[in-house]
Image: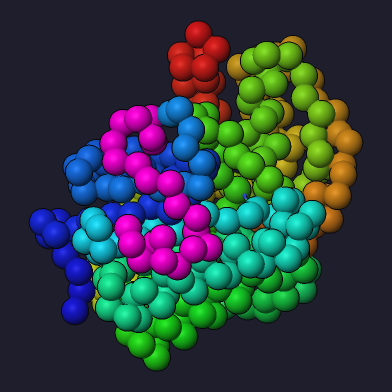
Amino acid sequence: MSHNFLSMDTKILIIGACGQIGTELTQKLRETYGKNNVIASDIRKLNNDVVNDGIFEVVNALDYNQIEHLIEKYKITDVYLMAALLSATAEKNPAFAWDLNMNSLFHVLNLAKAGKIKKIYWPSSIAVFGPTTPRDNTPQYTIMEPSTVYGISKQAGERWCEYYHKQYGVDVRSIRYPGLISWGTPPGGGTTDYAVDIYHKAITEGKFTSFLSENSALPMMYMDDAIKATIAIMQAPSEQIKIRSSYNLSAMSFTPKEIAAEIQKHYPDFTIDYAPDFRQKIADSWPASIDDSCAREDWGWKNDYDLNSMTTEMFKQLKENIYA
Ligand code: AKB
């Protein structure tokens, strides 16, 4: 039975609420469902709005009993599992990345299988693709041979999500996020993070050294669009979610050279140089652009931001809120 998104019994637990996505997702879910219906949790208790502006609990995503306890305490129906090690960090600690990324997922899948929660959101990534995948306009269904620890964990996770849906009827929903760009919370440990840092450096230093080479194209998205998509896929009637591994999702695609040119429209003296490091190899294994027609057809996905409008919005928000 599909779970009505406006039903009065929706109680949400966000695991990993203090991360780049979790922070903004928590705020939007609190606005949408009411503060008392959203429980934010993370392994760290920071002094920020996620912690201070609503219900917050410290939880280790690897501790099944802790998660189960919170689910029972707050009568949770929907879990958003946002805790993960991203691509660059995962390469430095493969065993822990595999442990965290896989076992946290098994915990929530098993809690749903046991009937303790109704719905799961779990993020996947363009990292599920690899060097043998067609790079341009990468289709939903194609060759997937990821070459990073992070990508391997996300691809395995997708297979398990589909398996739990088919075998046990678990209502799990997922999106393959591209690189996400936001002004509020810094990203941590990703290969696409340069595209956030570059905006800060344009304001503070007028120059930027990119760890990816000038023509390294990657799929990207403004955070507002990613949050909109995340809530939309969770609110869609169950029968519209035809893909239970994870949906391709796209908004824009650009190279370091192209984002620098866009920034120069606002800061004409801005300069960029290039010093590719180990993350270049990761970027080279990922798609340059994504075909997301399934998400558009199945549950009505549509992005609001492109490179031009995102750049204008990033500078507006950074200048008003961070560098005022
Ligand atoms: C990363 O760069 O690791 C992430 C991702 C694309 O999943 N931003």
On whether residue 284 falls in the magenta region, the answer is: no
Residue 40 is left or right of residue 133, and the answer is: left
Q: Position of residue 222 (x, y in %)?
A: 50, 40
Q: Quadrant of residue 173?
A: bottom left
Q: Where, quadrant-wise, is the N terminus in this rendering?
A: bottom left
Q: Residue at x 66, y 36 (%)?
A: 195
- The number of numbered discs placed on residues in the rendered structure image is 0
Residue 86 is left or right of residue 65, and the answer is: right
Residue 28 is left or right of residue 318, and the answer is: left
Which is more toward the observer, 17 or 312? 17
| Residue 139 appears anywhere in the view | no
Which is more toward the observer, 212 or 122? 122
Q: Position of residue 137 (x, y in %)?
A: 62, 63
Q: Position of residue 14 (x, y in %)?
A: 38, 52
Which is more toward the observer, 251 or 81? 81
Q: Is residue 274 above or below residue 107?
A: above
**Residue extending furthest toward the bottom:** 167
On whether residue 66 falls in the magenta region, the answer is: yes
Q: Position of residue 74 (x, y in %)?
A: 23, 56
Which is more toward the observer, 310 or 105? 105
Q: Is residue 111 above or below residue 42?
A: below
The region drawn magenta spans 49-70
| Residue 122 appears anywhere in the view | yes
Q: Residue at x 51, y 80 (%)?
A: 160
Q: Is residue 247 above or below residue 209?
A: below
Q: Residue at x 72, y 70 (%)?
A: 146
Display colour scheme: rainbow
